[in-house]
Amino acid sequence: MKYRLEIMRQKDSTSEPYLQCIDYETDDCNTAVSTALSQINNNGNYKDINGNIVSHISWECSCLQKKCGACAMVINSKPRLACDTKLSECNINGVVKIEPLKKFPVVSDLTVDRSIMFENLKAINAWLSSEYRSDDKTNNTAYISSRCLQCGCCLEVCPNFYAGSEFFGTSVLAPMSRVITLSENEDLKAASKLYKKNYYSGCGKSLACKDVCPAKIDVDDLLVNSNAAAVWRIGFGKKKR
Amino acid sequence: MESVNIIGAGLAGLSAAITLAQNGIKCNLFSLQPSERAQSVLAEGGINGALNTMGEDDCTENHYNDTMKGGVYLADPNAVDSLTQNAPDIIRMLQSIGVPFNTKDNEIVLRNFGGQKKKRTAYARSSTGKIIMNAMIDECRKYEKKGLVNRCSHHELIKLLIKNKKCFGVRIKDTYTGVINDYYGTVIAACGGMNGFFPEMITGTTQNSGEAAALMFSQGVEFSNLEMLQFHPTTIGIPNKRCLVTEAARGEGGRLFIERNGEKWYFMEEKYPELKNLMPRDVVSREMFFVRRMEDCSGEVYLDMTGLSEDVWQNKLSDLREEIIHYLGKDPKVLPIPVHEGIHYFMGGINTDERHSTNIKYLYAAGECTSQYHGANRLGGNSMLGAIYGGKRAALSVIEDNGFNEHPVFDMEICDDTPARYSVIIKIRDILLSSMGIVRNEQTLANAHSELSNFAAGEKLSEREKRRVSLAIAMITSAEQRKESRGAHYREDYPETDDKYKKIIVSAFKDGEVLTEFRQIPQRRVQK
């Protein structure tokens, strides 16, 4: 099967982006976008449809088994992990358009600088302020919220998030859910305050994030739990749990 | 004290950073990508510690004995002693920072793992690494906000600033901007295994290029036990790498078989009636290799998990099942799956003592890049323990030794920084694989050695490529020198373990030559 890969290239953060089209052939219906990118880079002799040698395509990857979130990019208009996206399934009439995530500054080609996500986690104090053990009751929520990859796919589709906004987007929801689920008393109050300010009050509940999450985190479930613990129960003066 | 420079932000690096911060000492945490992308998130099955919550009368001495025996007595006994004695506290510490280990009646549940007779492995379903990393990252963030940890993702180690066998800092490149800077201060290397020497054959991260190890070796850092590569018995092939099927699959009851004369032969159960499918990884991998070679056996070795209960699939191995279905299109609950050995862990690495010091003053190392805990074969569940305890121990040694007051200034000379070519990386890999597999012998090792030397002599290689060749030659030389079979190193020409070789092989790069020598393993100190 032959695919036309349309890859958004950009030499560095200040240069103009351009689209480079490469015809890529594979017999394997399991070939992922990550495989194609690796192969083109490793081979070094691939030519685009205009006969130009394809220079090294910059992109980030690490685990290649959808556990680290490094290779998030926009593939045929949808934010996805390159390692979890098969060419045979994502193509539209044989065409696969590959672009960098758009809510972050481009470093080069498909590599973007996602620092803002980590800065936001720092700003919202995403950590446990005291020692808290999870127990039979809290284990499940703590486990689910620990699975967030910090890949940024959720932010890409969020109608409310932009870099620099006071609303931090769903990439802080999972870490904060663990904090809120495990914390008590003053720690819970402090976490709730920031959760409300930087997440709850800005979320328009479009839940577009839920559909694109590569880790399939049940955003509804975390929202219900965290909102209940951080907003409603505290608001009505009830004790947690 | 200057800021401490930590190279690598996986579990060992994070543990070191947190320990330093808890003691009020600043550090720079350098890594190519953020901690969320580190190999540690791939660890699945669990972390060992004799918590003795299962009523099996377990104790840290049992853990010590199993670890030493699993590593066939090549590990540093005093290092293993501290590791295993501290293991229960490490797991309790993780619990106190909110790691949701599987619990029953609010007490941590332990599972069986290879090479251990007692249930000793704490776990969070089958994503233990990811779940532990998440809590450690959050914990580290607390100290970032306080200004104690300076997290520098997308930063690459260019060289160690070494003079007269003392390391005064690191030269680091910001890979996003290309800007190079020197950071003076004590260094802790926590840069992981040497995956990058075996592209497509490894279960770990592709982010780890092996370049940091090759660089340090070329700068005079001593390495040991380089012949000890761990082949994990149960992996499946996926594009560009091997995907691990956690040992927990066997810990929870999975069985290995091969078809022999048309019938399923559960060879591990027949050959090893006590530990059966849970023999140490080196033994299982070797047996798989041998049964596949037998004339009356046919096809691949299969892992049969069809007998596992619904509870196990739901609460203990949920992620694993989803993963296997995703990659193989087969439900392991219904059908046995074909498995094959894959390169999983490097027991060898930077030669470190029990304090995590190296032969270079002010340079320490922790995590998979070191060599003192696992000897000739690592037990499942001991890697995350080694990384967390090791990072902590290295940081404590740094604090005890209190760094240096003055340092020389290093010139910013222009150096050849051309990336290694993929064709060269693959050439070196193929030579290594031809001789450093599960079964080795004099002839193939000698052939590989000369092929690699000839290749290096006949090609115009960049600096990065040359360093890779040197470290690869050290791996092969170590395997040639060890004329016995021990743990992961199996020589068909010397199939027995020979106590004459109960020593570590230390490799060093000096004046353009790879040198190796045997060194004694320290004696275990008398217990108080």
Image (cartoon, helix red, strand yellow):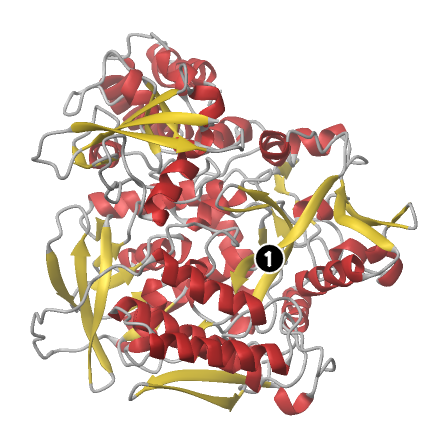
Asked which quadrant contains residue A111, the reply is: top left
Above or below: residue B526 compared with residue A143: below
Above or below: residue B380 compared with residue A5: below
Asked which quadrant contains residue A197, the reply is: top left
Using the image as rendered, state which of residue B157 and residue B352 is in the foreground: B157
In this rendering, would B168 be left or right of B253? left
Image point (63%, 51%), residue name: B121
Measured as percent of width and height from the top left, residue A174 is found at 39, 27
On the image, numbered disc 1 is attached to which residue? B49
Measured as percent of width and height from the top left, residue B131 is found at 48, 40
Neighbor class of circle 1 (other Cα within 10 Å; few <14, some 14-19, many 20+) is: many
Above or below: residue B477 compared with residue B411: below
The amino acid type found where label 1 is placed reads Gly
Image point (46%, 23%), residue name: A217
Using the image as rendered, state which of residue A236 and residue B349 is in the foreground: B349
Measured as percent of width and height from the top left, residue B308 is found at 77, 35
Image point (21%, 53%), residue name: B148
The chain carrying label 1 is: B
In this rendering, would A8 be left or right of B203? left
Viewer can see residue B326? yes
Using the image as rendered, state which of residue B133 and residue B399 is in the foreground: B133
Secondary-structure class at tag 1: loop
Measured as percent of width and height from the top left, residue B110 is found at 66, 47
Total numbered badges shown on the rendered structure = 1
Above or below: residue A58 compared with residue A187: below
